[in-house]
């Protein structure tokens, strides 16, 4: 646990209130325990470069929750290239009814995630060491998810190519991006077939971009939301 739990709690409550999030005590405890493990494991494996509690609260926990408004309760969610569990673990804590699947190719990171899942007693969430590029041929993944999401995992075009076969026909793909998202959209120009509509892997995807700023650092962030039409 973080050395000063009350200080951590105050930080995350203050930041979350700025953007309209409210947490029950159980969720706050789990966020704190999760963050503590992240900071401790930083000494052994490269889970995150961010270790200051205020930055962990804002740039990992709170930022991971921004897509929640676009994710219905009881959804099945696949987090590709999850790394230390972002955004999948914070979303699971915040929305317990989600069914969450975490995928990363690095064994140490997946082992950490399995440990965290057990420590926090999270249910209906699993972590898998798999190469994302191979999931389109995996029967347990193809067309199985209501939401496919990633945070700063890979280029937008590549992510959409990998995510399109995995999401249900009425589902949503969410790419969490930074301030350079417009440049990534421009790369898709050759795939554009209508205004805001792109043909990727034989799927017609309608894209919408939502931009926002983190509440303390004011860092620019973007969500790219893609739906099949």
Image (cartoon, helix red, strand yellow):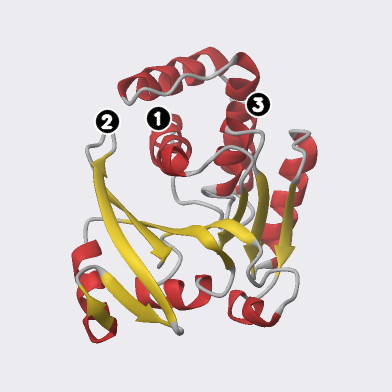
Residue at 22% in and 56% down: 179
Secondary structure of the residue carrying numbered label 1? helix
Give how far apart the Cα atoms at labels 2 and 1 are.
9 Å
Which corner quadrant holds the C terminus?
bottom left
Secondary structure of the residue carrying numbered label 2? loop
Categorize mark 1 by other alpha carbons within 10 Å: few (<14), some (14-19), many (20+).
some
The mark nearer the N terminus, 2 or 1, is 1
Secondary structure of the residue carrying numbered label 3? loop
Instruction: Quickly name the residue at label 1.
Output: 54
Q: Which residue is nearer to you in this view: 99 or 43?
A: 99
- Residue 135 in the image: x percent, y percent? 65, 76
* Disc number placed over residue 1 in the picture, else none: 3
Q: In the rendered image, is residue 111 in sight?
A: yes
Mark 1 touches mark 3? (CB < 8 Å): no
Q: Which residue reaches farthest front?
A: 229
Residue at 43% in and 18% down: 13
Give how far apart the Cα atoms at labels 1 and 3 are.
15 Å
Residue at 37% in and 76% down: 157
Name the side, left or right, on which 4 lies relative to 21. Answer: right
Instruction: Quickly name the residue at label 2.
Output: 216
Mark 2 touches mark 1? (CB < 8 Å): yes
- Residue 39 in the image: x percent, y percent? 56, 40
Look at discs 3 and 2 and give the one toward the viewer. 2
Residue at 64% in and 40% down: 74
Give how far apart the Cα atoms at labels 3 and 2 are.
24 Å
**Residue 123 position by quadrant:** top right
Categorize mark 2 by other alpha carbons within 10 Å: few (<14), some (14-19), many (20+).
few
Look at discs 2 and 1 and give the one toward the viewer. 2
């Amino acid at each position: 646990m973080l050395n000063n739990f009350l200080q951590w709690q105050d930080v995350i409550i203050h930041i979350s209130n700025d953007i309209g999030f409210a947490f029950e005590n159980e969720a706050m405890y789990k966020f704190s325990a999760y963050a503590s493990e992240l900071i401790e494991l930083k000494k052994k494996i490269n889970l995150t470069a961010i270790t200051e509690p205020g930055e962990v609260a804002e740039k990992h926990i709170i930022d991971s929750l921004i897509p929640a408004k676009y994710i219905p309760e009881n959804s099945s969610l696949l987090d590709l290239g999850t790394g230390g569990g972002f955004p999948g673990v914070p979303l699971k804590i915040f929305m317990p009814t989600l069914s969450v699947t975490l995928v990363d190719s690095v064994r140490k990171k997946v082992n950490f995630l399995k440990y965290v899942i057990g420590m926090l007693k999270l249910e209906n969430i699993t972590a898998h060491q798999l190469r994302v590029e191979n999931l389109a041929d995996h029967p347990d993944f193809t067309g199985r998810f209501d939401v496919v999401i990633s945070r700063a995992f890979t280029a937008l075009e590549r992510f959409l190519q990998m995510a399109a076969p995995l999401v249900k026909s009425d589902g949503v793909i969410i790419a969490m991006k930074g301030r350079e998202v417009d440049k990534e959209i421009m790369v898709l120009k050759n795939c554009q077939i209508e205004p805001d509509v792109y043909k990727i892997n034989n799927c017609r995807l309608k894209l919408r971009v939502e931009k926002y700023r983190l509440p303390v650092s004011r860092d620019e962030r973007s969500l790219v939301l893609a739906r099949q039409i």
